[in-house]
Image (tube, grey):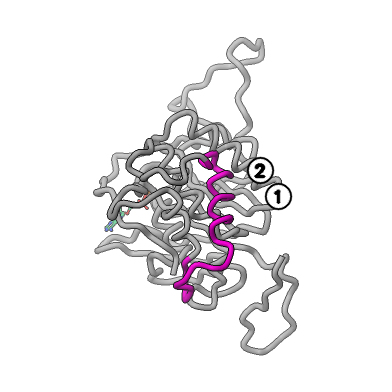
Amino acid sequence: MTTLATDSPSGAATPPADATPAIEARDVHVRLGASPVLRGVDLTVRRGEVVALLGANGSGKSTLVRTLVGVLPASAGDVRLFGHPLGNGVPWGRVGYVPQRVSAAAGVPSTAAEVVSSGLLHGRRLTLPRGWRSRVRDALDLVGLADRARYATHQLSGGQQQRVLIARALVRDPELLVLDEPVAGVDRPSQEAFAATMTRLVADGMTVLVVLHELGELAPLVQRCVVLRHGRVVHDGAPPTPRQEHGDDAHEHVHPHEHSRTLQRAEDLRLADGPFETRPESTEDEVAP
Ligand SMILES: Nc1ncnc2c1ncn2[C@@H]1O[C@H](COP(=O)(O)OP(=O)(O)OP(=O)(O)O)[C@@H](O)[C@H]1O
């Protein structure tokens, strides 16, 4: 693993790289238009952690991850990736980002391999590095699409397109993956392929921040859940205990509206405390600078 110095104005001794969190956000505020969307969010994701970001529609999950990867500016607060304040000093090659609801087939016609190869361009790197073909092949293989490399993206299903975008994030060989609802609306085979890919990556030490509506297939991997409500963190801790089966004698059926005190149950984490304003889907392809 690369050892990076933290930005220390005093030139003080640099802590070991592993001790520096992958993500550190302090008192982050974001306004979009006239509205405050994030209101003082603190979030730390340590190396090797798998953290799920949950919350109702409109609670600010996408806004938070877009701010963390430098796509949206914070109006106040501090965000650091691998100890570096957002900006050119961040080692962007170590960060893979999969935005929400972006079609891999949007814009110009391109093959799956071409879309994935674009993930190797970031920051000031405007040409593909040596060995890019095998890296693209490996990334497509990781998401189970090795045989689709030459397919035009519009020939792929929505789930396969989403997997192409995940491969595009993985081709950098990142240490940190930030994913915004990676399986929303994707077909079952793609969901299973995604869970299998994540299991392998997490076993290899990948740090993950993933926006989800429910833990689903990723439940065994998630170590911590952070829940947003109205732009604030209302829970940061252990994932909910898996519920017992209905057939179990000890099972007691509890509906979400029958309790409101704790966030320990899965129902609490499938929050639906709207109504919230909806917004048009974004079709822009967002890439961390
Ligand atoms: N470009 C924008 N301009 C103004 N308001 C916005 C903009 N983008 C998002 N919002 C508002 O910010 C709030 C948070 O949106 P955000 O997409 O971050 O929520 P979310 O938790 O990711 O929701 P979802 O689960 O539906 O994706 C919402 O009220 C939304 O309407």
Q: Nearer the viewer, residue 181 or 149?
A: 149
Tell me how many marks there are: 2
Residue 226, given in percent of the width and then of the height, sits at 54, 48
Residue 212 vs 265, above or below: the answer is below
Q: Residue at x 25, y 49 (%)?
A: 279
Is 113 on the left-hand or right-hand side of 223?
A: left
- At mark 1, the secondary structure is loop
* Quarter-of-image position of residue 95: bottom right
- Residue in the foreground of this view, choosing between 244 and 100: 100
Q: Was residue 38 drawn as part of the magenta stretch in this picture? A: no
Residue located beneath label 2 in the image: 200
Determine whether label 1 and label 2 are within 8 Å by CB: yes
Q: Is residue 122 magenta?
A: yes
Residue 252 percent coordinates (x, y)? 58, 16
Residue type, numbered disc 1 = Asp
Residue to which mark 1 is pinned:
204
Span shown in magenta: 121-146
Between 147 and 66, the one nearer to me in the picture: 147
Q: Which quadrant is home to the C terminus?
A: bottom left
Quadrant in the picture for the N terminus:
bottom right
* Mark 1 neighbour density, 10 Å: few (under 14) some (14–19) many (20 or more): few
